[in-house]
Amino acid sequence: MSGCSCTRSRTSLLAVSRADPSGLPRPEERPPVSAIAREQMQALLDVLPTPAALVELTTGDIAYANRAADELAGGAFPRGSVEDRTAGRPVTDGAGRELTVDELPSMRIARGERVRGERVQWRVGGRTLSLLVSGEVVADADGHPFGILLFEDLGPLRAAERRRDESLALLDTIFDSAPVGLALHGPDTRFVRVNRELAAMNERTVEDHIGRTVTEIVPVISDEVQHAVERVMETGQAITGVEITGETPARPGVTRTWQCGWYPVRHADGTIVGVGAVVSEVTERAALLESERAARERAERAERQAAFLAEVGEILASSLDWEENLARVARVSVRAKSVWCTAHLVQRDGTIRRLAGAHRDPAREHLLRELDRRYPLSFDDAWGAGSVLRSGRPELMREIDDATLRDLARDDEHMRLLGALGLRSRMIVPMVLRGRVIGTLTFARGEGERPYTLEDLRIVMEVARRATVGIAHAELYRERSHIAHTLQRSLLPPRLPEIEGFELAARYRAAGEGFDVGGDFYDAFQTREGWAFVVGDVCGKGPEAASLTSLARSALRTGAVVASEPSGVLEVANEAVMRERIDDRFLTTLFVKLDPESGTIAVANAGHPPLLVLRAGGEVEEAESRGPLLGVLPDATFPGDDVVLEPGDSVIAYTDGVLDAGAPDRLLESSALAEVASANAGRSAPEVAEALERLAIDVSAGAPRDDIAVLVLRRREV
């Protein structure tokens, strides 16, 4: 029951009085007579929520207790004599001392004393009551005095106090043992309280913090912390997740990282009375995160560099046009490694020529051209590409300020151009071929970009190395291709002869890249009896095939001198090849001899595809006689055929490269060639030869698997 209810009861029912030594009130201090009888008073007390009891003055007995008192006692409030009431029910004061009978509030009232807010504990109804007792003597309407006791149950209050004390103790325990730093700042932002963890972080005692400002404790980071505390005080909004890096006075030079948060501390009425702080040192975590970030950046950078080198490699391997390749490398570099990039090459006459130049902003590429035009490179330059060409050593300028740029520039206009291009960091690396510096690659970055490092220099030196290898390969290919083409031309007649009354046409196409000399060949030359035509196919390609081709051509020409029949010519050639046995190679050959007067041809075949005879009307015949390969069997013989060509008729000799052009997916039969030949009956010899070549190219999708040789002889129409 609250104190307010007790107060109202006392002011309406009680009158203050003092007792004389006899235990009864003195006449001059007797209580005034109440306006109601005692029975009425009891009825009134029954409806009051305040526990109350009436005490007889002569004995101290409890004569009456209201319903609230019974409820307080858990059933029936003990009545009767003091002995009955206290038997087994000791009464103690607020300090826990057991009261004597004379000290009991009821006995003190019986003696006429006034009791005001005495704290007692009384075990009633199986539980201990904590009570606040008040009382005094009053008189009823008849003037008879008696005592009245009023009780206030302190149990809920004590429970609340206990919970408060327990909570405070728990909070104190948490505050002191928390694994994070905790602090409380007062309205003036000074430390009111800190825990041991925060004191240890700052390497000061707890007592050192109290009453001091943040500046006095951790001056290096005080501005940021002070601003946060003041902001929370002003706005009432919490601030969390702030990382602060700095030093403490106890450990100067050691950078530490803390994660901090601040929150408002409010009074029950909502007023902000302070700011709480939560601090956790995350130096190791921050170092780990920084290490992980750095490792991640290194991995990403390595991945980008690997991708850049891979792309450069693909460009350099994509074609043998190394000048175009360098131009593409420059364009890739301005995307990955630089703002602008140039490539210079030393010419045969000793001059320096710019091969390529690219800028990240295409609108500025004209400045690169202007730079080369107005300020050409020289081997005498103290800096830049000219110096690198002279020395063969790379040049790395990590950071180029205005003073350095002025030193690099030849004049004000030169400095303006360099500034307009963007030059704040630069690398120049040489391209070295067989110990000779043949050119340079220049990479530059502008304002606000990361300066180049030795790692960047290593990467672009690798680019230069690959570019040099690409140039070397291209030059080697050109030289080899030139040799192969020259040798190939030497193995074919420079031109076909003109034969009166006849047309002669040939088509030749080497397979692949043209690195090696083809094994197919044809020839046409005049003999004593007329004209001779040869189509042959040597096994394999390259120098060995070329050697055998040269031997076969010479042997066939020699055989045409010593033998009159084609079969005899092939026998002479076979003997020559068998005698040389060049790398165990062999060849097929078709030898045709023409008598221009009669239009008769004699043909001998050494393992070669048969000669096709295309009649003017479109009919196609095959010369079926066929002997062994040349260079395989000694003393081989070669059967022959004679064919008479009428006006408009043609003969077609070809190598098996025509049939195998689409291998292995589309192999042609000689019947397919006959069909194409028939479709071109009546056409000129060059047209027929071209039609057969086109057939081979079509079935091979433009890339014949083997060399192709076609020779067409046509008798003109009268």
Image: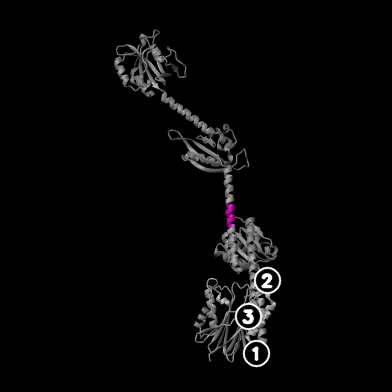
Quadrant of the snapshot with the N terminus:
top left
The mark nearer the N terminus, 2 or 1, is 2
For the point 67% across and 83% down, the residue is 572
Q: How many marks?
A: 3
Establish if 248 lies above or below 396.
Answer: above
Secondary structure type for disc 1: loop
Task: Specify few, some or many for label 3: CA neighbours under 10 Å numbering under 14, 14-19, or 20 or more.
Answer: some
Residue type at mark 1 is: Arg
The mark nearer the N terminus, 1 or 3, is 3
Residue 193 spot, x, y in % from top left: 53, 33
Secondary structure type for disc 2: loop
3D distance between C-alphas at marks 2 and 3: 34 Å
The residue singled out by tag 1 in the image is 528
The residues colored magenta run 297-304
Q: Is residue 21 visible?
A: yes
Residue type at mark 3 is: Leu
Say which of 246 and 157 sits in front.
157
The mark nearer the N terminus, 2 or 3, is 2
* Mark whose residue sits in front, 2 or 1: 1
Q: Quadrant of residue 306?
A: bottom right
Secondary structure type for disc 3: loop
Q: Is residue 375 visible?
A: no
Residue 693 spot, x, y in % from top left: 55, 78
The residue singled out by tag 3 in the image is 492
Residue 94 spot, x, y in % from top left: 45, 19
Establish if 623 lies above or below 142.
Answer: below
For the point 55% across and 88% down, the residue is 645
Residue type at mark 2 is: Arg
